[in-house]
Amino acid sequence: MAPKSLWGVLLIAVIAVAGYYLLTADKGGQARSGPPIVAVTVPQFTEAALTGKGAFDTYCAACHGANAAGQDGVAPPLVHKIYEPNHHGDISFWRAAKRGVQAHHWPFGNMPPVGKVTDEDLAGIVLYIRELQRANGVN
């Protein structure tokens, strides 16, 4: 193949990949949705956890999925043994939301900080996640 043809093929490939990325990615560079990664049993929540569910749905579910089940190609499930309290304490969720976190368990890339989430929201979110985890044997 001639050098000019090779450059032309390479340019077309780069344009195709960039186009696919722009059409399928949100502003954070991740796919917008994917199937759940884990099956989650939903318990009867305490009133406080229901408040946390509302905050989770507002700030977290777009990436971590409904009921923290994760989304394939987007973000990990939080109802998973990796996030059990003895491995990732409550403060880990706070730090991740406030500061972001570098990818270290999953191949989804780094998690950016969550804008506008308050300490009150985070307290409820953590309570909600912990109740989901207990109902699913993650404790």
Image (cartoon, helix red, strand yellow):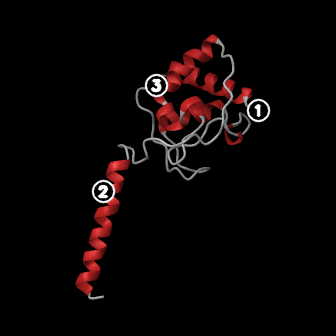
Where residue 102 appears, x then y in whole percent? 52, 48
Where is 135 relative to 79, above or below? above
First-in-chain label (3 vs 1):
3
Q: CA distance from mark 2 to mark 1?
A: 42 Å
- Amino acid identity at mark 2: Gly
Residue in view at x 36 percent, y 54 percent: 21
Cβ atoms at labels 2 and 3 below 8 Å apart: no
User: Which of the two marks, 2 or 1, is nearer to us in this view?
Assistant: 2
Give the number of callouts. Answer: 3
Q: Which residue is mark 3?
A: 58
- Amino acid identity at mark 1: Gly
Where is 138 relative to 43, above or below? below
Where residue 27 appears, x then y in whole percent? 35, 43
Q: Which residue is mark 1?
A: 137
First-in-chain label (2 vs 1):
2
Q: Which residue is mark 2?
A: 19
Q: CA distance from mark 3 to mark 1?
A: 25 Å
**SS class, disc 2:** helix
Residue in view at x 26 percent, y 78 percent: 7
**SS class, disc 1:** loop
First-in-chain label (2 vs 3):
2
Cβ atoms at labels 3 and 1 below 8 Å apart: no
Where is 83 relative to 130, above or below? below
Q: CA distance from mark 2 to mark 3?
A: 29 Å
- Amino acid identity at mark 3: Thr
